Image (spheres, helix red, strand yellow):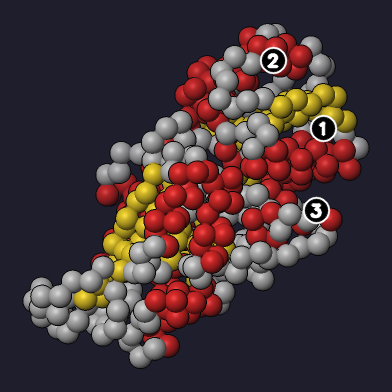
Amino acid sequence: MRHRSLLILTTAVTAGALTLSACGSRDDSGGGGDSGDKTTVTIGLDAPLTGDLSALGQGIKNSSDLAVKTANKNKEVEGVTFKLEPLDDQAQAGTGQQNATKLVGNQDVYGVVGPLNSNVGQTMQKVFGNANLVQVSPANTAPQLSQGPDWQKGDKKRLFDTYFRTSTTDAVQGPYAAQYLFNERKFKKAYVIDDKKTYGAGLAGTFSDEFKKLGGKVVGSDHINPEDRDFSAVATKVAKSKADFVYLGMEYPAGAPLSAQIKKAGGTLPTVGGDALYSPEYIKLHKKKSEGDMATSVGAPLETLDTAKTFIKNYKKEGYKAFYDAYGGYSYDSTWAIIQAVKAVVEKNDGKLPEGDDGRKQVTEAMKKVSFSGVTGQVSFDKYGDTTNKQLSVYEVKGGKHKPVKTGTFQGD
């Protein structure tokens, strides 16, 4: 029996055992039911599996795991069995880069799904790009990852052909929130705070630009260190600002206590943020004072999509301890996209998956043409590697849960 291992980094999909005769993990024993050689493709995953953001990371991992199991059960790629290999980046950019380097060094790796955080994604991009290794993120929203640092000036440039994502960007998410708050909630004055990180600062920036463009006024702005938990000084300024709401460009571990401290300081204004506040963990950390707070998130609520019914049913059936959370559907679709790219390469090469750099390049090329009906809707990518699905939703905390109040598409450039 010969067993060579083939590793793919991504957020979890397992394809079916097929008959293939080239590379990857080959089982020539002839046993186990299927005749001929089998190729095992391991799909890796990079996400914060421990630490403050582990609730989101575990949802990503479990959803990818479900995709892998589904692919194997259905024998999605003939001759190929997929296997999940999760890696923990703890939401740290340096750790993500180390994970990327480790996976690139394994010549059996053919694809990557992840990470959660945009700042982590930035450190991984070049590593994968230099190795021609495809990467699909279910959660990165910073526009510069796909469109370059000067995207706001109209000079959009794709820096890495290997980078793709199934979630829409903050170039859409921030303005969408601004339009909803100004046009529909009639809020005219905002206080804006960010954590100076790639995601938070970028989201706050696109929100502020659109809000002011509409005629709104930013009456105050601040930056916080997300590692702190005492935000009393900033909270007092916000409470006294006479703003209609406070907009937070940050993740829930800092956003929830900041919002709670604003209310403790006497502020009665709602807190609004992006997809990194859209989690049951925000409400749990905030305790009983999060009623009326709002968050946008990519896509439509999974529970409202016919395309997600099977995913939700099977996720519950598997008995995962963690909720699939905000990015579960996108993780499943990211993983499935890699599987479909591998499938296209295998079919192109008469049942063989090319080894080494050639194989990686072919999978990357195939990803550009991937298109399928996924959990989150139609999955495909534009010339920058961004998703073509631009839907977003606004959620408001009601009765201790995030309830959808609007779903639509950003109206603008």
Quarter-of-image position of residue 314: bottom left
**Quarter of the image that includes the N terminus:** bottom left
The amino acid type found where label 3 is placed reads: Gln
- Which residue is tagged 2? 235
Where is residue 303? Give x, y as percent: 48, 48
Quarter-of-image position of residue 201: top right
The amino acid type found where label 2 is placed reads: Ala
Where is residue 268? Give x, y as percent: 71, 15
- Which residue is tagged 3? 152
Q: In this rendering, which labeled residue sits more in front, label 3 or label 1?
A: 3
Q: In this rendering, which labeled residue sits more in front, label 1 or label 2?
A: 2
How busy is the neighbourhood of tag 2: few (under 14 within 10 Å), some, or many (20 plus)?
Answer: many
Q: Are marks 1 and 2 in contact (CB under 8 Å)?
A: no
* Residue at the image point whose x is 59% and y is 41% from the top: 275
Is 267 situated left or right of 113 in this image? right
Is 349 situated left or right of 92 in this image? left
Question: Which circle's residue, 3 or 1, is located before the other in the chain?
Answer: 3
Q: Is residue 88 visible?
A: yes
Query: Regarding mark 3 in the picture, which secondary structure is present there?
Result: helix
- Which residue is tagged 1? 186
Q: In this rendering, which labeled residue sits more in front, label 3 or label 2?
A: 3
